[in-house]
Image (cartoon, helix red, strand yellow):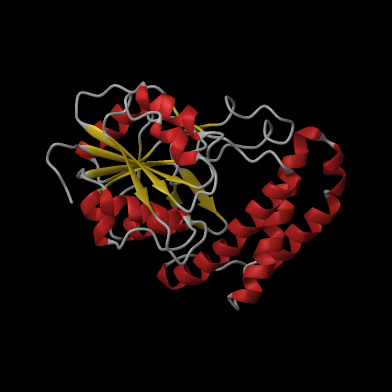
Amino acid sequence: MPDNNYRLSVIIPAYNAAATIAEQLDALAAQRWSEPWEVIVVNNRCTDNTIEVARQYEARLPRLRFVNAFARQGAAYAVNTGVRAARAENLAFCDADDVVADGWVAALGEALKQYHFVSGPLETKRLNTSPLTVHRPNAQADGVQSYTYPPFLPHAGAGNMGVRRELFEALGGFDESLETLFETDFCWKVQLRGISLTPVRDAVVHVRHRDRMGSLLRQARKYAEYDVALYKRYRPLGMPRLGVKSGIRAWIDLVLGVPDLARAERRARYIWELGWRTGRLYGSIRYRTWAL
């Protein structure tokens, strides 16, 4: 229920984030903005002591609240649950394993006074020092990500995003049927209504990448699978068709690139590409559409 005493609700979906959420809440506790704002931690079936860790910040974040999202596992469902509990007219999303930079709350809060839908840059160096993470490219360094396969509308990750509540609710929130890329889907729905995704340069989030090969491979595979789902959904809405040759060429490049596994600076990129191509193959079969 909206409350005029709040101008921004920061929503953090959390699942077993005890090892990282304190760093995020430290950063939020250090934020300064002239307007009243709140933080909502959404407990999405945590089995560790994430909530116990977070409750230690109630004195430093007096508008810190907790919401349970127990019906099922899923980030889209968790964020939607947080939105329903939010008191502010504007919403900001960040993740429990990242760290917002100084000025993030004020930057997004002020931007949402002028724009309906905003996102900020991701910074990837501070929290990623392992050989597998340090060389990963940063697609959202400028606040939005380009979508190039095939070329379509820009998008952004939900880990650094702000939106007016009325717009979020008008579009039904995030699509909970999508395990991943629900934020990409939301970005496109907004833009197809004629509303721009506006980058806010000062709203920086330090993002933490996965630093295990198996985890990185699974993440890429899942992203690619749901990327095919979006391709099928948005083809009738103006997304260009993918060619057969481009998909076959990508698999040939993957085979030729096997030696990259021996090179630290290229290993993460190759593992991601392997997971991505496998996921697109699976997605093409699952959704009965050619999108290799």
Q: Is residue 155 above or below residue 210?
A: below
Q: Is residue 239 above or below residue 5?
A: below
- Quick check: can you spot residue 90? yes
* Residue 189 found in image quarter: bottom left
Residue in front for this viewpoint, 205 or 151:
205
Tell me the quadrant of the picture where the C terminus can be found: bottom right
Residue in front for this viewpoint, 179 or 69:
69
Residue at the spot x=21%, y=45% of the render? 87
Residue at the spot x=57%, y=37% of the render? 138
Residue in front for this viewpoint, 46 or 134:
46
Question: Residue 223 in the image: x percent, y percent?
Answer: 59, 56
Question: Residue 221 in the image: x percent, y percent?
Answer: 66, 58
Q: Is residue 133 left or right of residue 45?
A: right
Q: Is residue 103 left or right of residue 49?
A: left
Question: Residue 181 in the image: x percent, y percent?
Answer: 50, 56
The tally of labels here is 0
* Residue 30 found in image quarter: top left
Residue in front for this viewpoint, 32 or 138:
32
* Residue 244 found in image quarter: bottom right
- Quick check: can you spot residue 195? no
